[in-house]
Image (cartoon, rainbow, N blue to C red):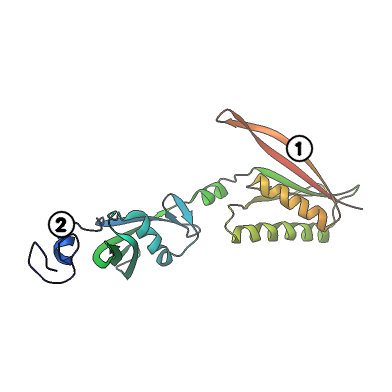
Amino acid sequence: MFCVECGHEGPTFEGLCRDCFLRKHPLVHPPETLDVAVCAHCGRVEIAGRWERADLDDAIPDLLEARVPVDPRATRHAFTHTARREDDRNVLLTVTLAARVHDRDIEESFRTRLRVKRGVCPTCSRQRGKYFEAILQVRAEGRPLTGEEQGRLLAFIEAAVARRAAKGEEVFVSKVEDVRGGADVYLSSNAVARAIARELADAFRGTVGASPKIYGRRLGKDLYRVTYVVRIPE
């Protein structure tokens, strides 16, 4: 087989050798720069509209997949890259796309610059704004909590939140208030607060009560903040 454009003998793609084919039909149309937002507080990286828990270096393959258009002719494609940091805000990428075109393997390389911009992810924004959806109150039946009891209950709640956050759930403790008889824990997720309240009651043989309160409306629906009260026995 030979190329109908230049006459070169060898494998062809739609009658063209590799170089002529890529000149007429580039498989990728890379931007000169790729802007990426990294949360200044937690380091999450914004990829395709989602904030991912990942180091920037580990996130580069996903960024390339999300941001570099690939010709539909290229199937089973994959990006590989090498990175050279120019400074804290700029990374020079040398990228190779390997793909199948008409049952033949083909590669195309290009360079682009990754520009790092500082941002704030929604979770950190809410956390710094003291956002909460529920209050988890810890109390004792008929008496104030002792300092030792309160410490154990709060440690249980903090550990339960940390486990969920480590699994990728968007949950955090907004604040903890010492109040008469116990403590109030403000949580960012009503569903998580409800689950932890039940876990806490089971672990300490207590009871759970709930009191919802409307605090606004969104898209025609009432929004509730719920106060959960866990009381441990005398």
Above or below residue 114? Residue 170 is: above
Q: Quadrant of residue 222?
A: top right
How far across and how far down the image is residue 158, in percent? 69, 58
The label on residue 211 is: 1
Residue ID at (77%, 55%): 199
| Quarter-of-image position of residue 9 | bottom left
SS under mark 2: helix
Query: In the image, 163: left or right of 9?
Result: right
Locate the N terminus by quadrant. Answer: bottom left
Q: How dense is the environment of label 1, judged by Cα within 10 Å: few (below 14), some, or many (20 and up)?
A: few
Residue furthest to the left in view is 6
Q: Is residue 112 left or right of residue 36?
A: left
In this rendering, position of residue 34 left or right of residue 227: left
Nearer the observer, 176 or 172: 172
For the residues marked 1 and 2, what is the alpha-carbon distance in whole angstroms? Answer: 67 Å
Q: Which residue is mark 2?
A: 24
Q: Residue at x 81, y 53 (%)?
A: 201
Residue 62 visible from this viewpoint: yes
Find residue 205 and report its image quarter. Answer: bottom right
Give the camera-side residue of 179 and 22: 22
Please report the residue visible at 76 percent of the width from the left and 44 percent of the height from the top.
228
Q: Amino acid at mark 1?
A: Ser
Nearer to us in this view, 106 or 49: 106
Query: Residue at 66% across / 50% down in the picture?
Result: 175
**x, y percent for residue 39:** 46, 56
Give residue 76's position: percent from left, percent from top.
Answer: 35, 62
